[in-house]
Amino acid sequence: MSQTFRHPDILKIAQREGKVTVEGLAEHFGVTLQTIRRDLTELAEANKLERVHGGAILPSGTTNIEYEERRNLNETAKLAMARACAQNIPEGCSVFLNIGTSTEAVARELLHHRDLMVVTNNMNIANILLDNPDCQIIVTGGALRRADGGLVGNLTIDTIRQFKFDIAVIGCSAMDEDGDLLDFDIHEVGVSQTIIAQSRKCFLVADHSKFSRTAPARIASMQALSTVFTDRQLPGDLKQRCADWGTDVVVAKPAKPVS
């Protein structure tokens, strides 16, 4: 069966079962795992499926991908963005890191920074930074989301308002074509808006998959950011818009695998 005929059938299986796996599809079609991975990549690039670890799911504009699944998405891109972002965070400053797998990657790149004060509403980030003895860690209060270790709500916002951060590092679930940052949880949106308001500089770490996704709640415009760290050029006229807004864009290319 040719690739042209496989794609509609893969989509039908995904619509019926909610998720497809590489191994399951390879067995179903009698082709190699590599062939199925290529099919899923092409369907993802066409915004018909969303790649997750071991397979793909249907894209959604109202619900987010499970947190553990997101950890495995675009890992090399997240590493490249995190390194570029950390290089722009000087030692001896105050930093806020919010909820997200990309911000967790940034935390790992800060393990050798000295004299940092990091405030976070992400329990995972607090645990990561325990390995840096030269980093003061402050965890906001708030309601704990067990799914991702995030702290949200009015208590979180009240805590954040007590600070003025040198730098905040945030993520988003999606990015609209007009430059709006979007998310799924309205409670998390309120936290992100407060983080931006209480920071002298705000960095966004967002890989290219966010360009083709959508979500219902608006955080802010990219105009409110100091720098965007991503792994591909921004789509459409967003690059020019960022230039007009004074928002720097850093494209961090993922390292090529060693053959």
Image (cartoon, rainbow, N blue to C red):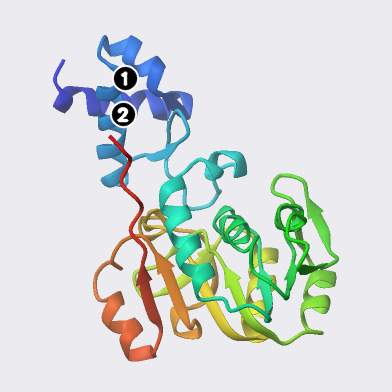
- Tell me if residue 206 can be seen: no
For disc 2, the marked residue is 37
Where does the image place residue 218, in percent across and percent down from the top left? 53, 71
Q: Is residue 44 left or right of residue 21?
A: left
Is 5 located above or below residue 138 in the figure?
Answer: above
Residue drawn at the location 48% of the way across and 62% of the way down: 83
Where does the image place residue 219, in percent across and percent down from the top left? 56, 73
To which quarter of the image does residue 231 belong? bottom left
SS for callout 2: helix
To which quarter of the image does residue 48 belong? top left
- Tell me if residue 124 can be seen: yes
Q: CA distance from mark 2 to mark 1?
A: 6 Å
The amino acid on which the numbered mark 2 sits, given as a three-letter code, is Arg
The amino acid on which the numbered mark 1 sits, given as a three-letter code, is Leu
Where does the image place residue 27, in percent across and percent down from the top left? 34, 10
Pick the quarter of the image with the N terminus: top left
Is 109 located above or below residue 86 in the figure?
Answer: above
For disc 1, the marked residue is 33
Q: Are marks 2 and 1 in contact (CB under 8 Å)?
A: yes
Residue drawn at the location 41% of the way across and 58% of the way down: 207
SS for callout 1: helix
Pick whichever, 118 or 4, lies toward us.
118
Is 161 located above or below residue 3 in the figure?
Answer: below
Density class for disc 2 (Cα within 10 Å; few <14, some 14-19, many ≥20) is: many
